[in-house]
Image (cartoon, rainbow, N blue to C red):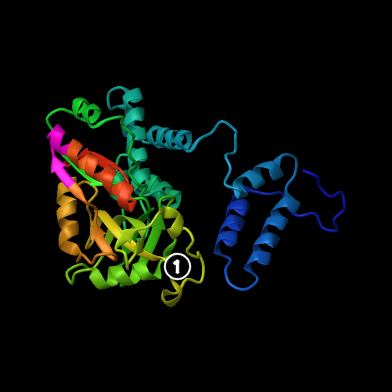
Amino acid sequence: MRRSSQTMIHKPPPLTVAKVLETFRRIAKESGKNSKEKKKNHVRALLVAACDCEPKYLIRLLLKDKLRIGLSELSLLEALACAAAYAEKHSVSCGSFQSDLSKAVDVLKGVHSMVPVYERIVPALLDGGVWNLADTCSFSLGIPCEPMLSAPAKSVSEIVNRYHGIEYTCEYKYDGIRAQIHCMDDGSIRIFSRKLECCTNQYPDVILAVKRLKRVPVKSCVLDCEIVGYDSEQMKILPLQKLMTRGRKGVHVDNIKINACIFAFDLLYLNGQSLLQEQLKIRRKLLEDSFEVKTGILQFATALDSSNLDEIQVFLDKAVNARLMEDYPRVLIQSSKTC
């Protein structure tokens, strides 16, 4: 990077972690008229104040690139958990301390998957300790949890042979955008992407659909779903590329050319209660009781509950054929007792 050698009248103070974080937050909050220029000014101020190798890492952070310093978020979580365990005196006397460290890491990883916000986790660690963290920092409305991702398998028999004697829930896996829809207590709705970014303004039609098809007893909830493009005239799902042509800013219902359909497959929260520890079959039943179905607007993922290899294979074949005809994707298989 080429840097200017121009002498400044007043040298800016050295950068601190707190200062960089505060500036990044300001950049994220800038919106409206001249927001692009304001963001550039924030970045310029950081680079002017940076010295030595700091500009390199600032740019990597701004570009969401890996820092390439040998530190991953997993390492950070492990270090944080171990530090919290060391800080608690009673943890030393509970048998093997090495075992306690492993348990502390598992606790923190579990909490972070449900509440991936360090501003919530660290104060809870300081106040209640690592062993009470699951109670003091739990899944709540307005903060998206990390999505549970699937792993590929070569065949149905591979899955059945790996897990004997259990019933599976098999679902069509749709070619769309993974989303968490949070219905807040005040009636507002927030939509988060797979990367936990807020994308509410991109889907005003989805917001209207959820408000319209949510049943009366539902005051608040979190819907796990796939948002897909949908052709209302031909009654068919559109490829993801079509949905991606929709605008990201200034989207209004009257100007939408590619309709969105919600394919819901899980309910994570309902009326003040987290459902993450409930079995999948219970969550699906609550999901079906909580929303009305409207073709092309809100539907439930096509699913099959079975432990029979032949039935599951037939279901997979139907999904493959449907994909060829209507752009349905493949099948997702998981235990119906999964939490």
Q: Give the quadrant of residue 332.
A: top left
Dot 1 alpha-carbon crowd within 10 angstroms: few under 14, some 14 to 19, many 20 or more: some
Vertical arrangement, residue 332 with respect to residue 71, above or below = below
Residue located beneath label 1 in the image: 201
Along the line of sight, the residue nearer the viewer: 320 or 50:
320
Q: Position of residue 27 (x, y in %)?
A: 60, 60
Q: Is residue 339 visible?
A: no
Does the magenta segment cover residue 32?
no
- Tell me what residue is drawn at x 31 percent, y 33 percent: 90
Write the start and end of the magenta stretch as one range. 304-312
- Tell me what residue is drawn at x 50 percent, y 35 percent: 72
Q: Position of residue 281 (x, y in %)?
A: 15, 48
- Tell me what residue is drawn at x 77 percent, y 43 percent: 1
Vertical arrangement, residue 92 with respect to residue 208, above or below = above
Along the line of sight, the residue nearer the viewer: 258 or 88:
258
Vertical arrangement, residue 159 with respect to residue 304, above or below = above
Q: Is residue 321 visible?
A: yes
Looking at the rendered structure, the kind of residue marked 1 is: Asn
